[in-house]
Image: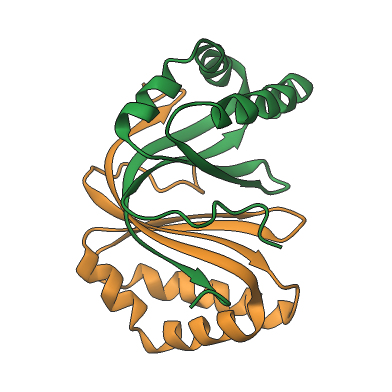
Chain colours: A orange, B green
């Protein structure tokens, strides 16, 4: 029941918050690229975890967690990720926001109180 | 196409990140409470916006944005919100994480580059 959560992270750490609205275009490539990028991110230094969901209207939120700002910059500059960022701008997203945040405190529930 | 985004926020500001897995229990009350709380939050001092989505498996992410930590504490202590927090622990969620983060920088796309 907890496999979709990033668990046991100890603040402070960083979150890249990515709310996004899919355009509906290019679904097969989008899904494949998403899976590949999630796997690649796991091998990056400083990667801590990922949480992601999307509703039937195509509105999604993905959050990746990182140890440092430097780790985020390295991931942003990864070649496969750069290619995906371009496809995101040209085809995949009708709109997105990207917010880099420092997580200062955190709790779990309902068991983990 | 952008109505589900919190737009035009200027860092620094705060994000309350709430990834959660619904238990599947009490759906009617849960939906009604969610709508009420979203309306109440809008009237709280320091409220900046909300982004929320959930997939068919009941895994959701809700993020609320606030001007200050003080605004977050006031909202956490709101009576109707406290009642909802108790229902969340007892009935609504199989698991959740709650992370308070300071947004340090942000971008929009693909138009807003």
Q: Is residue A43 left or right of residue B25?
A: left
Q: Is residue A74 left or right of residue A98?
A: left
The answer to whether B47 is drawn above or below residue A53 in the figure is above
- Name the quadrant containing residue B2: bottom right
Residue B83 visible to the viewer:
yes
Q: Position of residue B20 (x, y in %)?
A: 54, 37
The answer to whether A47 is drawn above or below residue B102 in the figure is below
Residue B63 visible to the viewer:
no
- Quarter of the image with the N terminus of chain B is bottom right
- Figure label count: 0
Q: Is residue B61 left or right of residue A14?
A: right
Taking the spot 62% from the left edge, 31% from the top edge, the residue there is B38
Taking the spot 79% from the left edge, 23% from the top edge, the residue there is B28
- Name the quadrant containing residue B111: bottom right
Of the pair A105 and A6, the residue shown nearer to us:
A105
The answer to whether B88 is drawn above or below residue A38 in the figure is above
Q: Position of residue A42 (x, y in %)?
A: 37, 68
Of the pair A31 and A19, the residue shown nearer to us:
A19
Taking the spot 68% from the left edge, 54% from the top edge, the residue there is B3
Taking the spot 62% from the left edge, 68% from the top edge, the residue there is A95
Q: Position of residue B36 (x, y in %)?
A: 67, 23
Of the pair B87 and B103, the residue shown nearer to us:
B103
């Amino acid at each position: 029941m907890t496999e979709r959560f990033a668990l046991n992270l100890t603040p402070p750490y960083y979150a890249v918050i990515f709310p996004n609205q899919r355009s509906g275009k290019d679904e097969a490539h989008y899904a494949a690229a998403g899976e590949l990028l999630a796997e690649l991110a796991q091998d990056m230094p400083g990667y801590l975890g990922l949480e992601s969901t999307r509703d039937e209207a195509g509105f999604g939120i993905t959050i990746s967690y990182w140890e440092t700002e430097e780790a985020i910059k390295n991931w942003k500059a990864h070649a496969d990720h750069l290619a995906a960022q371009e496809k995101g701008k040209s085809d995949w997203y009708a709109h997105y926001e990207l917010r880099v945040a420092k997580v200062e405190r955190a709790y779990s529930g309902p068991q983990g109180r």
